[in-house]
Amino acid sequence: MRLTVNGVQPTLVMNPIDERLKQLAREAQRHPPKTPQRRLALAKLLSAIQQSRKLTRPYQGQFQGFYEDIYDEAKQRLFCHICEKIDDYDPNREVLQWVNFLLKQRFFIEASRTILPTTPKGIDPKKVSRLTLDDLDRKTCNELNPQLNPSLSQDVLQCLESDPEGVFKGTYTSDNPAANFQFLAIKLLSGYSWKEISEELGIKISTLSSFYQRCLTKFAPKFREYLS
């Protein structure tokens, strides 16, 4: 027997966001893979998920300095999975319940393993941090690397320009040889901001700064060798 309030049975109200997402998911499932109709329904579904602002943000407070890069990568993996595996979605479940479970339990973890640098044994990767973009914007290459004495800035610049083995210029990101470590480091030492460099290369600041940070760690032994 159902409970009543003043003799009136309550009506179950479906969350309009959940209902809309379910409709789009079912619409995508109705069409064969790789058809324009399925692609359109999937595009609408992904857009609606984004606009709902109800995607989970797991492990906040951890992965300092890396979190946004990891989260962006995890979302991309999640959306690709939705497009490829929409037929695996069970219409009896809420769409957000399904995608948030995948985002937290699978794709965020996978993305963190891809983006986080290798850490020494005994160090918790979740406690690894890196400088923020503001820090990078304010500091020069030698200040960012504790192994380099700030008084050696001119020597560092000469080392970067001469690049005796070609490793600084030969290491680049985004399949763009112009976005190489030599170029970035010299630009930063010359006082250019990340925003200016990003606009010149047409590459996101987060991509450039992440690449640059990895290079500083990678080339620290080279700098010590060249400057010793």
Image (cartoon, helix red, strand yellow):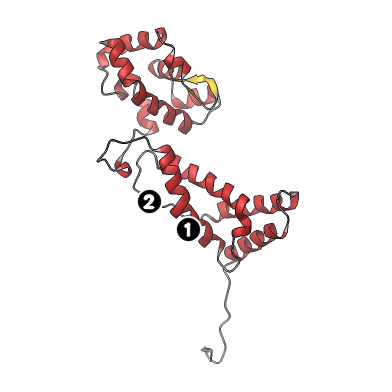
x 55%, y 56%: residue? 52
Residue 64's x, y, as percent? 34, 41
SS assignment at label 1: helix
Q: Residues within 10 Å of mark 2 (few under 14, many from 20)?
A: few
Residue 127's x, y, as percent? 29, 42
Residue 66's x, y, as percent? 39, 39
Hey, what amino acid is under mark 2? Tyr
x 49%, y 42%: residue? 73
SS assignment at label 2: loop
Mark positioned earlier in the residue sequence (2 or 1)? 2
**Cβ atoms at labels 2 and 1 below 8 Å apart:** no
- From the viewer's perspective, tell me whether residue 27 is left or right of residue 194: right
Q: Which residue is mark 2?
A: 59
x 36%, y 8%: residue? 158
Q: Quadrant of residue 10?
A: bottom right
Mark 2 or mark 1: which is in front?
1
Q: CA distance from mark 2 to mark 1?
A: 13 Å
Hey, what amino acid is under mark 1? Phe
Is residue 12 shown above or below 225? below
Which of these two is toward me, 186 or 94? 94
Q: Which residue is mark 1?
A: 101
